[in-house]
Amino acid sequence: MNGALRLEQVSIVVVDDDLASRESLALLLESEGARVVTAHDAEEGVDAILRTRPDAVVCDIDLPGMDGFYLIQRMRDDEIRSDRAPAVAVAVTGHSGDAYRLRSIGEGFQYFMTKPIQPAQFIAWLADAIGERTTD
């Protein structure tokens, strides 16, 4: 870390069914000052989002039961009903094909990243995206 916490006071929900991925993302984000809530599936993720109304959501697409597309649709519906600014939404997945990227963007994610993420690049990019959200 280079001094300043780039995600200080930012709330982020991380949804991933893989415990190691979920914990490593949470630790990375917390090391930059973010307040992180984690969830292991889409239903738990939706509950966390509705409860915390985060600045950003980082979500795996392939989840048990309901997938990440279900989660993002529920989140976007709630934002519209509540007349709330949309959270930054990042799809993080092992799928690298254009079909997944295009569907992710079409379903309501603004950004698409393939695992494994590059930590420094991911943090810088996420901080910029959240910063743009708060200045609009």
Image (cartoon, helix red, strand yellow):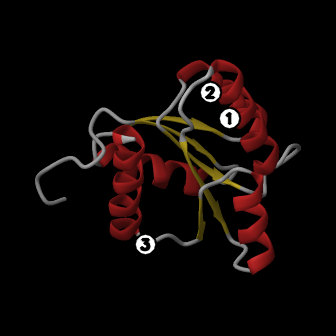
Residue 10 picture location, percent across and down: 36, 36
Residues at marks 1 and 2, CA–CA distance in whole angstroms? 5 Å
- The residue at the point 75 percent across, 31 percent down is 77
Residue ranking furthest to the left: 3
Say whether residue 23 is left or right of residue 3. right
- The residue at the point 14 percent across, 49 percent down is 4
At mark 3, the secondary structure is: loop
Which mark is drawn over residue 48?
Answer: 2
Residues at marks 2 and 3, CA–CA distance in whole angstroms? 26 Å
At mark 2, the secondary structure is: helix
* Quadrant in which the C terminus appears: top left
For the question of whether residue 59 can be seen, the reply is: yes
Residue 33 picture location, percent across and down: 28, 40
For the question of whether residue 41 can be seen, the reply is: no
> Tag 1: Cα neighbours inside 10 Å, few (<14), some, or many (≥20)?
many
Q: Quadrant of residue 84?
A: top right
* Quadrant in which the N terminus appears: bottom left
Which mark is drawn over residue 118?
Answer: 3
Residue ranking furthest to the right: 65
Say whether residue 79 is left or right of residue 65. left
> Tag 3: Cα neighbours inside 10 Å, few (<14), some, or many (≥20)?
few
Looking at this view, is 68 or 136 the one in front?
Answer: 136
- The residue at the point 43 percent across, 72 percent down is 118
Residue type at tag 2? Ala
* Residue hosting label 1: 45
CB atoms at circles 1 and 2 under 8 Å apart?
yes
When the figure is inspected, residue 50 is found, relative to residue 41, above or below; the finding is above
When the figure is inspected, residue 48 is found, relative to residue 56, above or below; the finding is above
Residue type at tag 1? Gly
> Tag 2: Cα neighbours inside 10 Å, few (<14), some, or many (≥20)?
some
At mark 1, the secondary structure is: helix
- The residue at the point 62 percent across, 29 percent down is 49
